[in-house]
Amino acid sequence: MLSHSAIDVLSKAEEGPLNQEEATELMADCSTEMLVAAAGRVGNIKSGGIITYSRKVFINLVNLCRDTCTYCTYKKELMDPLLSMLNPSQVLAIAEQGKNLRCTEALFVTGERPEQKYPEARTWLQSHGCASTVEYIDQMSRLVLQKTGLLPHTNAGSLTKKEMNMLQDTNVSLGVMLETSSERLTEKGMPHEDAPSKNPKVRIKTLESAGELRIPMTTGILVGIGETPEELVDSLFVIRKIHEKYGHIQEVIMQNFAPKPETGMSSAPAASFDYFLRAVALSRLVMAGMNIQVPPNLSPEIFGQFIDAGINDWGGISPVTIDHVNPEFPWPSIGSIKAVTEERGKQLRARLAVYPEFLKGGFITSERLQNYINLVADESGLVRESYLR
Ligand code: SF4
């Protein structure tokens, strides 16, 4: 039975920001039903009846990686038939397909600094006149922007301030998942033991440096990789505190862990639906005014329930490319996402790779980037309906 104190905390959660102790209490004591109901009410206020998604192409630029996370199937080795090292004409072909299907986002994804581990990656980058993966991302972002007008958003793992400053000229936003604030998960036998870039200190530094540069930033949590409920709550508060300081976290992705064959965590249990739903609801109560996203392809059939738990975004959906990080989970069609969204009494709208509230406030400093944004955005900052026809 719900304690009186948890009931008090839950009603407070709808009125103002929870503190970490209160959120931990809710995660431990509150029924899922009550947590979801409260988060749904707070989410309704945030969404204003609109759930967004970004129409994108996923450009799998290079999937070599110097790190090893024990749940990952994105990273490939040199002889793997699914190794991806895209040359400029391949990048452009994907972006042009996206342009033809009214996409607005070019999502660039890479493994973590492949050039530090693979001489072949260094040679490949040098053949394109680049000394690092980030330099090549910058080059490809410029190419895609100029030739197609698709707005680049890069997730290349942990980046330095100097590297992000370079990408700021061509990328409307950047992304790095915090995944977890738990340093315990970097210890021997844990998922991030061989992934120095996943040390929370490194990820937090990247997020803070982006804040100093005023770059709209996507981050998020990978739920169910072995964290305790207390560590999950702590991760939410780490993100909230960074946003309170810099105001630049444009969205928080809540992603559920699902074990994959032939990985170190293949026999680990998936995040249960109940635990994940509670985590999503709590994220809304902890970050009432922020954008919360759940990728619908990772919870096919039931993703509508995350609207009930207060989310306001479905993330990037592609009519062109697969989700290269989770290729076994195809994206639902945009038509079916629209139907599920409308069943919940909400309207589905396409957004840019930068959220409307970050089009103001000095976040986009490049005039050229602003001009490309103006071509596709309406006065609300979402994608102009006429562009999608
Ligand atoms: S850093 Fe990213 S790409 Fe590399 S192993 Fe970890 S999850 Fe995979």
Image (cartoon, helix red, strand yellow):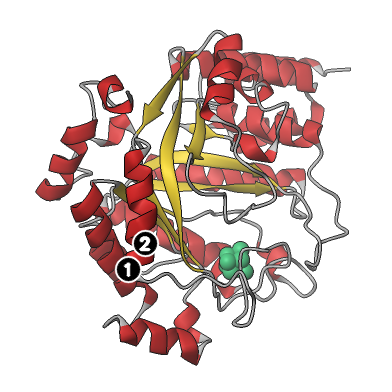
Of residues 279 and 241, which is closer to you in this image?
279
Give whichever of 301, 3 is nearer the camera: 301
The residue lying furthest to the top in this view is: 345
Q: Quadrant of ligand 1?
A: bottom right
Vertical comparison of 190 with 320: above or below:
below
- Classify mark 2: residues with Cα within 10 Å, few (<14), some (14-19) or many (20+): many
**Pointer 1: residues within 10 angstroms few (<14), some, or many (20+)?**
some
Q: Quadrant of the N terminus?
A: top right
Q: Residue at x 30, y 73 (%)?
A: 135
Q: Amino acid at mark 1?
A: Pro
x and y, in percent, of residue 345 in the image: 55, 8
Residue 58 placement, left or right of 91: right
Query: Residue, x 51% and y 14% (percent of image)?
Result: 44
Q: Quadrant of the C terminus?
A: top left
Query: Where does the image place residue 357, in percent across and percent down from the top left?
Result: 30, 30
Image: 45 above or below 226? above
- Label 1: state its secondary structure: helix
Measured as percent of width and height from the top left, residue 55 is found at 42, 37
Element type at mark 2: helix
For residue 316, say whether it is visible.
yes
Q: Position of residue 214 (x, y in %)?
A: 27, 49
Residue occupied by mark 1: 88
Residue drawn 36% across the image and 69% down it: 160
Judge whether 187 appears above or below 356 on screen: below
Circles 1 and 2 in contact, beta carbons < 8 Å: yes
For disc 2, the marked residue is 91
Residue 74 quadrant: bottom right
Residues at marks 1 and 2, CA–CA distance in whole angstroms: 5 Å
Q: Within 8 Å: ligand 1 and the Cβ of disc 1?
A: no
In depth, the one of 322 and 20 nearer the eye is 322
**Which residue is found at the position 54% from the left and 75% from the top?**
64
